Amino acid sequence: MKIFCSHAGCSNIALAGCRVCEKHGGKTAMPDGVSKKKLSAHKRGYGIVWRRLRKMVLAEEPFCNVCSKNPSEEVDHIIPKFKGGTNERENLQGICKECHLKKTIEDAGKAPRCHDNIRIVTGAPFSGKRSYVYPQVHERDIVFDWDKIMKATQPSMSGKGDISLGMALRDSFMAHAKKLNENRRAWIMLTDFAAANDMCDVTKGTLVVVDRGQDVALNAAHKDSNRVLEAVINSWYANYNAYVRRYGEREGQINIGELING
């Protein structure tokens, strides 16, 4: 049934679900099935009350409740709202963006993408990381040499300055690598074994450990008269062996040996 605009003196037909016509500010009611994304934050349950609650949770839980490493940037419903979860405080937790994304995918019952095309290559100095990577790089692949980037972005020759630029470049590269088509590869080379594992957690890439043996690496550093790298090599093997004893090798880890210097 058509309804006339209720505005005084107007003979136009009122819009569906509204008492006035378009000329007098009427808006068509949203039909069933329209995405909630078109609704305002308030109508979706994220109005001023939610914003105050979110601020309180982030203040109480400054670090991610899932990984306990990154700062909390978002507030997560432990039991999702579509599964009956509420905005009660005990159902909310501070969480970082990376963990929130993974949890959202798991809550929806979807399998996260495995990035087999991302290779994180680690090893002690003189292990042959570059000799392993560069012969395999194709025209459309991308390569990130973490050690060289950090050295180039260090403001002091001692290497103890601000590392924020290098870290920002790393994060930007990893974000870009995760968006690559599967027919392109992203190669990340670095010495820091712990950081390599962290990158694997973030990117879901494959860890490649290049290891010619500690003695071989030390002999190469000695021939190069580089005492600093000798200390780095000993430290790398100590950290690597301690990690493997405690956690074992990473699932899907690739071990490479017998390479030339690099």
Image (cartoon, grey):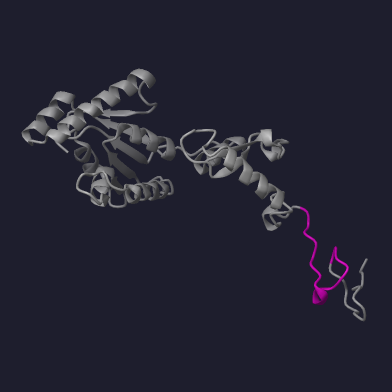
Quarter of the picture holding the C terminus: top left
Quarter of the picture holding the N terminus: bottom right
Q: Is residue 156 above or below residue 79?
A: below
Q: Is residue 243 above or below residue 142?
A: above
Camera sees residue 260: no
In the rendered image, which quarter is residue 204 located in?
A: top left
Q: Is residue 161 toward the left or the right of residue 61 in the image? A: left
Which portion, as a residue range, is magenta?
16-32
Q: Main secondary structure of the magenta part?
A: loop
- Residue in the picture at 23% in, 28% down: 235
Is residue 23 inside the magenta stretch? yes
Viewer-proximal residue, 190 or 3? 190
What residue occupies the far bottom of the structure in this picture?
9
- Residue in the picture at 35% in, 49% down: 164
**Residue 138 locus on image (x, y percent):** 27, 48
**Residue 98 locus on image (x, y percent):** 50, 41
**Residue 145 locus on image (x, y percent):** 27, 45
Q: Is residue 15 toward the left or the right of residue 205 in the image? A: right
Q: Is residue 105 above or below residue 11?
A: above
Viewer-proximal residue, 32 or 203? 203
**Residue 245 locus on image (x, y percent):** 33, 18
- Residue in the picture at 38% in, 21% down: 247
Q: Is residue 215 toward the left or the right of residue 17 in the image? A: left
What residue occupies the far top of the structure in this picture?
245
Q: How many marks?
A: 0
In the rendered image, which quarter is residue 206 located in?
A: top left
- Residue in the picture at 58% in, 42% down: 58
Camera sees residue 167: yes
Q: Is residue 150 above or below residue 235?
A: below
Viewer-proximal residue, 106 or 190? 190
